[in-house]
């Protein structure tokens, strides 16, 4: 998720050559306030989020006996392979659902990139270097580091950090991009960032008791020497996350609940594709280092409940020779499509917000959706197109058959959600029992609620467009992953992720990321 921002920051390091080391009282405050008040005997809850971890990779590694840490945790815990992610399956939206327990129609973070009607601006949290450069490094950094938590994430919606604080529990976040909580912190921006971005030297944010966000907020600066080199200077990487958590464990400073984000695997799978096992093996070694900080892995499960999840899956993208990239701006060339870096004017007709294998297509001039859909359907590589129509949500399949649904009704799905459905349920591969009035999901897990969440996540007139497996969507400057891996869509490969729970027999009510907040709060409350 942060790959584009990290690449650009490294370039800025090289260009400006200087980095200002800053210490602040807030950093010392973090270490003073982070430790649980429950006493040394109280077990802690540690959530490890591994970007793009997939059950298929774990199973393959277990079969080859190259993942000893995963194997131990699974043998001494619970292992589920079908935890349903949020939609679109992009980390920033998923983390928002994870930490608020809400879908995008409630938490208001629609994707890694989306269009704000209010600001007349394409919001981008860091999709790819070319897009970031065109939109402006400062704009992207401000959205990712400041506006995302301060204003884009629904200010009226409490996070897990807010609610655990009300229970008297201590919390911490290591490298989580969604970090909002009740405690004030300062993000200290290095001097080489000020000139090219026009961002201030430091900014005030709200977070959990302990907030580590790479070099931007490092309470251990001057205490722990994190891995060096340009690639590690920003600190938003696995090694920073592990070394920070290991310090808290060894120094007996763990909070009641600690969130740890490990981003590195995502970059490797985007490049090499889902079958690549090297990144998973390295992650296994890093998890072993983390758990050995307790003294041994056995001690770790006596002192903590460890929950490990992937945030999204990944689909293989066809190689270059099989034309895997769908250029939406080219498909829609008959319209005045906004080009990144230009101003959005009264003449702009279409804005594209591409999230790998899904995209929001915005109509700014009240162009009929059916007209745009007909244009898009000229490309057979597009799978689903969905949009709002009054209280209904309509979905068109690749064969142009249509299905529509709305909330409430006589049909109940796997998660106890009620729906009214009409037309062709095969469009979403729904299994309908007309006698029992039940809905079961096939290729698109929890498709009804997840589409509803995306299509009510923000203001505007827009389509949700999803590519067929093997393909990904593109604007002119979007990153592509030909021959590698991609995600964003509703399909099972993108949507189902592993969940490992070690140290307790408790389990969530439903196997969905949106249900984990309540589960985690329950675990913390019991300790």
Image: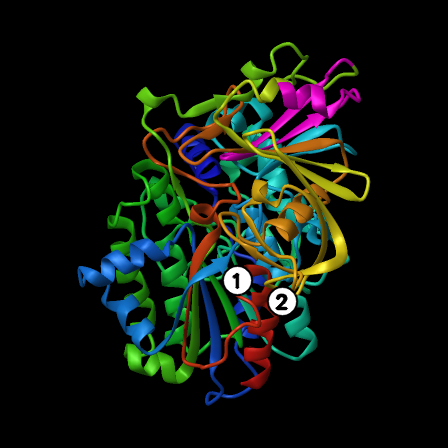
Name the disc covering residue 161, or none.
2
Q: Reading the chain from its start, which is encountered first: label 2 or label 1? A: 2
Residue bearing the label numbered 1: 173
Report the label total: 2
User: In the figure, residue 81 lies in which quadrant?
Assistant: bottom left
Residue 396 appears in the picture as rendered: yes
The answer to whether residue 200 is visible is no
Q: Residue at x 64, y 9 (%)?
A: 334
Above or below: residue 142 compared with residue 47:
above
Q: Residue at x 55, y 73 (%)?
A: 32
Q: Assign a secondary structure to mark 1.
A: strand
Q: Which residues are magenta?
A: 347-374
Q: Measured along the vertical axis of the image, is residue 64 above or below residue 247?
A: above
The residue depicted at 52 percent of the width and 38 percent of the height is 191
Secondary structure beneath label 2: helix
Q: Identify which residue, 469 or 439, lies in the foreground.
A: 439
Q: Position of residue 281 (x, y in %)?
A: 25, 56
Q: Crowding at label 1, few (<14), some or many (≥20) Cα neighbours within 10 Å? A: many
Picture disc at residue 106:
none
Q: Where residue 161 sits: x, y (%)?
A: 63, 67
Callouts 2 and 1 close, C-beta under 8 Å? yes
Would residue 323 be found to the left or right of residue 87 on screen? left
């Amino acid at each position: 998720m942060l790959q584009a921002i990290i690449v650009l920051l490294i370039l800025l390091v090289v260009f400006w050559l200087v980095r200002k080391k800053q210490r602040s009282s807030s950093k010392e405050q973090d270490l003073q306030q982070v430790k649980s008040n429950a006493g040394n005997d109280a077990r802690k809850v540690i959530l490890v989020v591994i970007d793009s971890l997939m059950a298929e990779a774990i199973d393959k590694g277990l079969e080859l006996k190259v993942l000893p840490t995963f194997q131990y945790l699974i043998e001494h815990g619970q292992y589920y392979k079908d935890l349903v992610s949020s939609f679109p399956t992009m980390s920033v939206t998923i983390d928002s659902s994870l930490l608020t327990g809400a879908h995008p129609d409630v938490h208001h973070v629609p994707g890694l990139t989306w269009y704000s009607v209010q600001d007349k601006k394409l919001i981008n949290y860091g999709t790819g270097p070319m897009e970031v450069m065109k939109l402006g490094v400062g704009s992207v950094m401000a959205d990712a580091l400041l506006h995302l938590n301060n204003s884009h994430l629904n200010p009226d919606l409490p996070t897990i950090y807010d609610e655990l604080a009300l229970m008297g529990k201590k919390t911490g976040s290591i490298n989580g991009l969604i970090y909002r909580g009740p405690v004030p912190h300062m993000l200290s921006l290095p001097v080489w960032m000020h000139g090219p971005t026009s961002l201030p030297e430091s900014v005030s944010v709200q977070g959990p008791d302990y907030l580590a966000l790479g070099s931007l907020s490092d309470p251990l600066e001057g205490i722990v020497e994190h891995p060096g080199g340009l690639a590690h200077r920003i600190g938003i990487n696995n090694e920073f996350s592990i070394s920070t958590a290991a310090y808290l464990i060894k120094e007996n400073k763990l909070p009641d609940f600690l969130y740890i984000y490990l981003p590195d695997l995502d970059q490797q799978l985007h490049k090499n594709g889902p079958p690549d096992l090297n990144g998973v093996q390295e992650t296994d070694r890093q998890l072993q280092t983390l758990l050995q900080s307790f003294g041994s892995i056995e001690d770790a499960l006596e002192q903590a409940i460890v929950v490990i999840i992937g945030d999204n899956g990944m689909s293989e993208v066809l190689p270059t020779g099989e034309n895997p990239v769908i250029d939406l701006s080219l498909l829609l060339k008959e319209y005045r499509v906004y080009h990144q870096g230009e101003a959005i004017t009264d003449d702009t007709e279409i804005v594209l917000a591409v999230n790998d294998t899904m995209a929001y297509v915005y109509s700014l001039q009240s162009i009929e959706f059916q007209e745009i859909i007909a244009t898009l359907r000229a490309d057979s590589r597009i799978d689903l197109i969905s949009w709002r129509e009054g209280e209904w949500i309509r979905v068109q399949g690749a064969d142009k058959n249509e299905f529509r649904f709305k909330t409430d009704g006589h049909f109940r799905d796997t998660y106890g959600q009620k729906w009214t459905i009409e037309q062709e349920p095969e469009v979403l591969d729904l299994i309908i029992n007309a006698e029992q009035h039940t809905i079961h999901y096939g290729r698109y897990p929890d498709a009804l609620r997840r589409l509803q969440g995306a299509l009510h996540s923000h203001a505007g007139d827009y389509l949700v467009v999803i590519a067929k497996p093997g393909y990904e969507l593109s604007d002119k400057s979007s990153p592509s992953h030909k021959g590698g891996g991609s995600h964003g869509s509703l399909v099972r490969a993108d949507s189902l992720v592993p969940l490992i729970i070690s140290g307790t027999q408790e389990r969530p009510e439903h196997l969905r990321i949106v249900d984990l907040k309540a589960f985690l709060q329950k675990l913390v409350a019991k300790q």
